[in-house]
Image (cartoon, grey):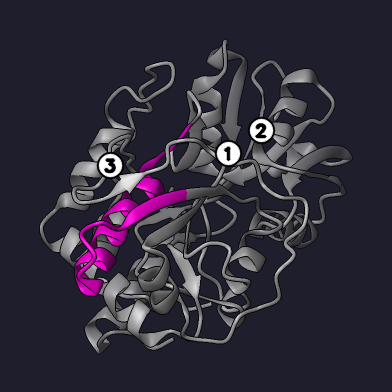
Amino acid sequence: MTCEANPARFGMVRALAAACAACATAGVIAQNTGTAAGLSTSAKAEVPSPALARTAEPPGQTLQRIQATGRVVIGHRGSSLPMSYVANGVPVGYSVDVCLQIAQAVGRHLQRRDLRVDYRQVTSGNRFEAIERGDVDLECGSTTNTAARRQRVAFTIAHFIASSRIVVQSQRPFERIEDLDGKTVASTVGTTNIDSLAREAANKSVRLRIEPARDHAEGFGWVVDGRVDGFAMDDVLLYGLRASHARPQDLKVIGKPMTIEPYAVAFERNDPALKAVVDAELRRLIQTRELHRLYDKWFTQPIPPHGINLGMRMSHLLVDSLRYPSDFVPQ
């Protein structure tokens, strides 16, 4: 990928460098249960398939497929609250809201006022394969833009920035990763967190047994049940899981940020026409401050299904990165 302009490139570099130096905590994200104007949606969340049967399609086919079928398929997550999750059988979340706006922009570009939105649930393990095979058009979850992943898919401008940390039981005497020496810590398979956890432990000579979980809900549940001593994941997702727990005070998020995680919408890698539409819509959302309003909706107000309020103001890191919207990530 190329960065949009030098100010954008250096703006993101400065923001990420400052975050690493200060070990800043990541920002926030918003979510909308409504439908973007001019689009119809299939509200039911689909269960992820154990295997994807189709072979990878030729590059540059996403817009052509959308034009032919009259539908945009959004890949969503099942338990990445507040980014992308299922509430009352319906996919919701900040990332889902962002993708609904993008779908509306695609409809305008294709001059399809009747464009429909369908949903397909994906996991950390199959989300990129789903894009490559054309099973989903936009992956709208809690997905970090990295150099390795850019070999498989494209990313738009980052709409959120998180940091990897660890959740533990409040009664346990753990406050930093060093306190977990000789313990078992889970992380979700197919995420950047499971690798950064191993790297951080090695750098600090901490002996950890790392247990891979199928999804965030499973790893978090292991901490609650006492099966593992901690669960490493992006801080925003940890706070969301904690807030939705029956007894949030029984759990705490510990340690300094282990990584900086710029979240972005993922889509087909070799489709410059699609990327132009997606990036233009993200810039519009940022410049009109619609993205900020979505953020406030999902991070400073009650959200479904239980009306919890994360009370998370937008971080300085995210605020700074939105001043120079770019898809450039220095990693």
* Residue behind mark 1: 78
C-alpha span from label 3 to label 1: 19 Å
Who's the residue at 77% across and 57% down the image? 51
SS at circle 3: loop
| First in sequence: mark 2 vs mark 3 | 3
SS at circle 2: helix
| 79 inside magenta stretch | no
C-alpha span from label 2 to label 3: 26 Å
| First in sequence: mark 1 vs mark 2 | 1
CB under 8 Å between callouts 2 and 3? no
**The disc label shown at residue 217, or none:** 2
Foreground mark, 1 or 2, reads 1
CB under 8 Å between callouts 1 and 2? yes
Whether residue 28 is visible, yes or no, is no
Q: Quadrant of the N terminus?
A: bottom left
Foreground mark, 2 or 3, reads 3
Between 19 and 59, the one nearer to me in the picture:
59
